[in-house]
Amino acid sequence: MDDDLFISRSALAARLGHPDAPWVLDVRRAERFDGAAHRIASALRSLPDSARERDVVVYCVHGHEVSRDAALTLRASGRRAWALEGGIEGAEAGVDDPAFVARVRAQPLPLVRQRPDLGVCGDAPSCWITRARPKIDRIACPWLVRRFIDPLAQVDYVPADEVLSRAQATGAVAFDIAGGPISHVGDHCSFDALLEAFGLHTPALDRLAAIVRGADTGALDLAPACAGLLHVSLGLSRLHAMDDQAMLAAGMTVYDGLHAWCQSETAGTHESHVWSPA
């Protein structure tokens, strides 16, 4: 195996969810893609025209010639591209070396459930719609969508009484509204519902979910960061009271930072900050 051409599953997983994460390109043959229940988090079926400056990771089923050839083709066009070691299924038992199969499959990789019923399968940009004047859940959910489900997703904020009718008319996914497919269930908020809908769980995302849930539902004792997220969100809402898209852009940075902190916390690599006088 050409080590320079392949990226490990753990190396890719560490970069997913970051604002500078590579584009992830699903190059499985059509019959395998169409019949698949999952894809790798944030994976697309084709790259956008504006994607030339970002790294690309391609994957097929087992990490053999399909993804290797795709990565080589991208490199020949001047792109920084790698093939995913072992593909989405973690190599092929009975074909690849058993030790290699075991090593690859020991590296967890976040997957998302294909949701054709919601129009979210990675083969076309998805559309999402919710109530205007977002603060917590309606910022956290688009962050999760764009970082882990569909980086090209369009998110619209409209008056509450128009959300469901416009979702039906346009095929957009209505979220954080009663009657929509993604909303509060019991004590859990829409961010929790979105994670469940796509079967998306990592230690960092589960930690982040508790923070979002506590801040959004008023259960501030769920995690120490809940109160901080609530106060920052309310402050940003005042700053961007006339522009929901500006609020989303500002909030994306907040959740990027929170997720990075959750990653370091759950991995045991977190930094501490203690003031000491000079």
Image (tube, grey):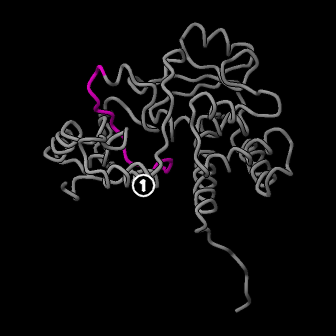
Identify the image quadrant of residue 218. Answer: top right
Q: Position of residue 184 (x, y in %)?
A: 76, 27
The foreground one among 130 and 1 is 1
Q: Position of residue 121 (x, y in %)?
A: 44, 24
Q: Main secondary structure of the magenta part?
A: loop
Please report the bounds of the magenta region as a residue range.
Answer: 16-31
**Amino acid on which the number 1 mark rests in the picture:** Ser
Q: Position of residue 31 (x, y in %)?
A: 29, 19
Q: Residue at x 54, y 18 (%)?
A: 118
Q: Which residue is mark 1?
A: 10
Based on the picture, tell me whether residue 28 belongs to the magenta stretch.
Answer: yes
The foreground one among 187 and 132 is 187
Quarter of the rendering occupied by the C terminus: bottom right
In the drawing, does residue 231 fall left or right of residue 191? right
Judge whether residue 173 can be spotted in this image.
yes
Q: Position of residue 21 (x, y in %)?
A: 42, 49
Q: Secondary structure at mark 1?
A: helix
Q: Is residue 143 above or below residue 208?
A: above
Q: Residue at x 57, y 37 (%)?
A: 200
